[in-house]
Amino acid sequence: MKIPAELLYSTDHEWVKVENGKAIIGITDFAQDQLGDVVFVEVPEVDTEINAGDGLSTIESVKAVSDVYSPISGKVIEANEELSDAPQLINEDPYGKGWIAVIEIADENELKELLSAEAYEKLLSEEA
């Protein structure tokens, strides 16, 4: 299971890609693997203000319904509407086409709370 080095990670298995004051958010390969086949994704409404730790999205798989929590605070400026018609993108390409939302970062200091790829890998090995 590859863990992209350029991303940041939450202990809840979300990833964050920071670009120009914005954060692209999705779930990790580990998370999608645990969920199994994704059948439905509820993406957040654009313009929603969200705090770190708030529910961002809901993912339904053949096994379970899981909440995706926002790793950071800010305003949702884009949601991946493609997931409505193609929820399997989360399984097929969790770090690419399976992204869930883009948030305008309210407080860059929150990024310091997130894990590096190395720290996330360690977390996974401890959970295994």
Image: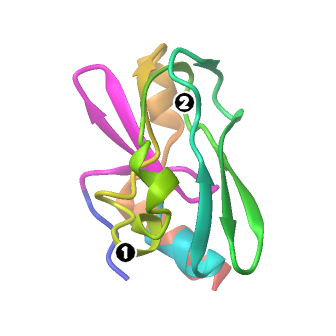
Q: What's the residue at 70%, 79% (across, down)?
A: 62
Q: Residue at x 55, y 50 (%)?
A: 10
Label 2 – label 1 distance at C-alpha:
25 Å
Residue extending farthest to the right is 64
Decide which of 108, 44 is in the foreground and name it: 44
Q: Residues within 10 Å of mark 1 (few under 14, many from 20)?
A: some
Could you tell me which residue is drawn at 30 percent across and 34 percent down? Answer: 18
Work out whether mark 2 precedes mark 1 in sequence or the reverse, and give the earlier one.
2
The secondary element bearing badge 1 is classed as: helix
Residue 81's image quarter? top left
* Residues drawn in magenta: 6-26
In the rendered image, residue 124, in percent from the top left (x then y), is placed at 55, 75
When the figure is inspected, residue 74 is found, relative to residue 94, above or below; the finding is above
> Badge 2 is on which residue?
72
Q: Which residue is mark 1?
A: 92
Q: Position of residue 74 (x, y in %)?
A: 52, 18
- What kind of residue is marked 2? Ile
Magenta segment main secondary structure: strand
Q: Is residue 15 visible?
A: no
Q: Position of residue 88 (x, y in %)?
A: 46, 70
